[in-house]
Amino acid sequence: VLVTPSSELAERVSAELTVRRPRTRHAERVAAALSGPQSAIVLVDDIDQAIAFSNASAPEHLEIHLSEPRVDEFVNAGAVFVGDHAPVSLGDYLAGSNHVLPTGGQARYAAGLSASTFLRPQQVIEYDRAALAEVRDAIVTLARAEALPAHGEAVEARFED
């Protein structure tokens, strides 16, 4: 997917694809991919719309080709490649970035595979009587507001003499 505010660039890329596609080893696969619903040239009004489009689509790989990349604003992508000299193939084969990335827009809520994927974080909460007493009323109030009074009762029971 190419997202650009430049109709001139869109036309140049489309023409270049027409030339390059039949020359590649897997021309039929490339043609099928480029004609599928996952491929498009999208014209937007400005870079802000391009950023919004990118964040909504959450691409597996994102190449940013801007004079001012604004990388921090592209928040939903599996891997981000910045500039003319950082093609996706650099990440695939040599740069050391992850190659097991979220697909299908999952980059909105998931990161690429990493060592932390195989770790199981655990939440450990430890309070003493005085600490629980400080938050007692807040817990009871929230439990009542959620119509889950037993949660509040579980706290109150700890202060029955």
Image (cartoon, helix red, strand yellow):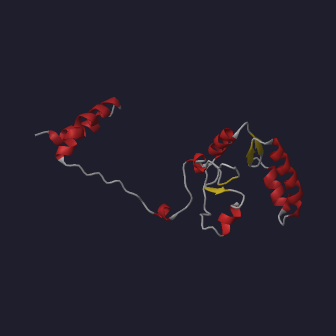
Q: Where does the image place residue 140, in percent across and percent down from the top left?
A: 26, 34
x 30%, y 30%: residue: 144
Q: Horizontal placement of 96 versus 120: left or right?
A: right
Q: Quadrant of residue 54?
A: top right
Q: Where does the image place residue 23, in percent across and percent down from the top left?
A: 88, 63
Q: Quadrant of the C terminus?
A: top left
Q: Is residue 45 above or below residue 86?
A: above
x 71%, y 52%: residue: 65
Residue lying at the far left in this picture: please name it. 161
x 28%, y 37%: residue: 139
Q: Quadrant of residue 51?
A: top right
Q: Quadrant of residue 90?
A: bottom right
x 59%, y 48%: residue: 76
Q: Horizontal placement of 76 versus 21: left or right?
A: left
Q: Horizontal placement of 52 versus 34: left or right?
A: left
Q: Where does the image place residue 116, in percent across and percent down from the top left?
A: 47, 62
Q: Is residue 146 above or below residue 127?
A: above
